[in-house]
Amino acid sequence: MNIFQETIINEECSQVICVFDELILLLHHAKQNIHMKLMFLSMITAYLCGNVYIFVRALQMLSGLSLGGKLALSLCYWLAAFSLVISLFARNIEMPEFLSRGLFSIGSVWLVFTLYMVLALLATDIVRIFLPALKPYGFGIALGCTVCLLAYGYFNYKHPDINRIDITLDKPLEGGPMKVVAISDVHLGNGTRKPQLQKFVKMINAEKPDLIVIGGDLIDNSLLPLYQQNMAEELRQLEAPMGIYLSPGNHEYISGMEECERFLKDTPIQLLRDTIVTLPNGLQILGRDDRSNRRRTPIADLMKKADATKPILLLDHQPYEVAKKDSLGIDIQFSGHTHHGQVWPLSLLVENMYEQSHGYRKWTNSHVYVSSGLSLWGPPFRIGTDSDMAVLTIK
């Protein structure tokens, strides 16, 4: 065997070892998150069952429709039901913008339409047991109520809250108080497009912040829409003399971390992945990598690199182990990810999944703010929840 062949064999062995290593990590991760996977599977099953229920009820109402009409209705209905799945699988395939946006928009709207249409149909089914005269109108009533509720949800989404919070620290900042605008879950892409981003930028700049922090998921599922719409041009309009810092979220990993890093180089936003930056006034920004990176540095090890005598602001996209972080001497934590469920009744589920699912709370040592998201993922509705931007005055 010559040296060249031996080198090839060694490289192949190394690749095999790496693959097995990844498989072991994936299995370990899967065991830790088995309840999440089961919940996800349950939601998919419920979505399919809900669509079958609506479809059957629609056919009952349109029983007089011709066979050709029923076939056309069936095709349109199931295309709408699965358009979000098609959009996500084809997110990195170049196609006309109207097509990628159309698939994503129809599919994401259909997701929430299914939820509330099923609830409305169940309600009308119960009511017509006691009021049989309503039987011919049940589907129409349910459809009308659902459309009105979605219209409200869209209006509510378009008007995010600005939550102003004063935070007094035990470790004073040099030079006096500072204003920080904290946002998360903007999800730039086919859902949050450039016109909406322009409104967000104006809203942020109107606060004249000293510092802007972004708690992950700035980008949605793919970088293609951001390049197509030249969103970097708008992000360059953000103004904060002490800087703009982003910790990655799971969607930065979904869209491709390396591609995200290349995109951000054309903006004033600095990406922090298990990195500490100390500002001139002494504030330390600890930007933690997302849980999607199973090899990220443990929070206790990161804290060893910080100066415990100076204020520490932690950016960590997913708000897990808040109590543990509170015990480590973190002064302020800003997170996102939860969206507060985005719509009721998912908000109730999210509230039981996290120690703190949204809003501000003072723990023993830490001031913690979990954003519901300046924007949202997928369906453009806020029902029972609110989009938000936090304006923190730190003293």
Image: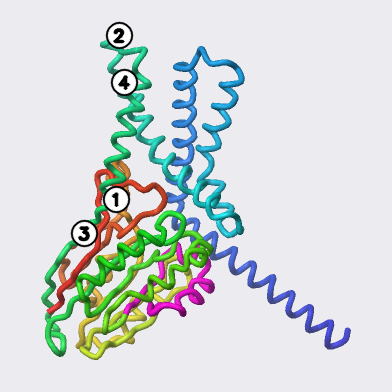
- Amino acid type assigned to the residue bearing label 4 in the image: Thr
- Give the structural element (helix, strand or loop) at label 4: helix
Along the horizontal axis of the image, is 148 left or right of 164?
right
* Numbered circle sitting on residue 133: 2
- Amino acid type assigned to the residue bearing label 2 in the image: Ala
Pick the front one: 374 or 339: 374
- Amino acid type assigned to the residue bearing label 1 in the image: Tyr
User: What residue lies at 59% left-to-right and 67% top-to-bottom?
Assistant: 22
In which quadrant will I find the N terminus? Answer: bottom right
Q: How is the image coloured?
A: rainbow
Mark before the other along the chain sequence, 4 or 1: 4
**Which residue bears the numbered disc 3?**
359
- Give the structural element (helix, strand or loop) at label 3: strand
Cα separation between marks 1 and 2: 37 Å
- In the rendered structure, which segment of residues is drawn in magenta? 244-272
**Measured from the top left, where is residue 360 in percent x and y?**
18, 62
**Which residue bears the numbered disc 4?**
124
- Give the structural element (helix, strand or loop) at label 2: helix
Q: Is residue 184 above or below residue 306?
A: above
Along the horizontal axis of the image, is 328 left or right of 194?
left
Mark before the other along the chain sequence, 4 or 3: 4
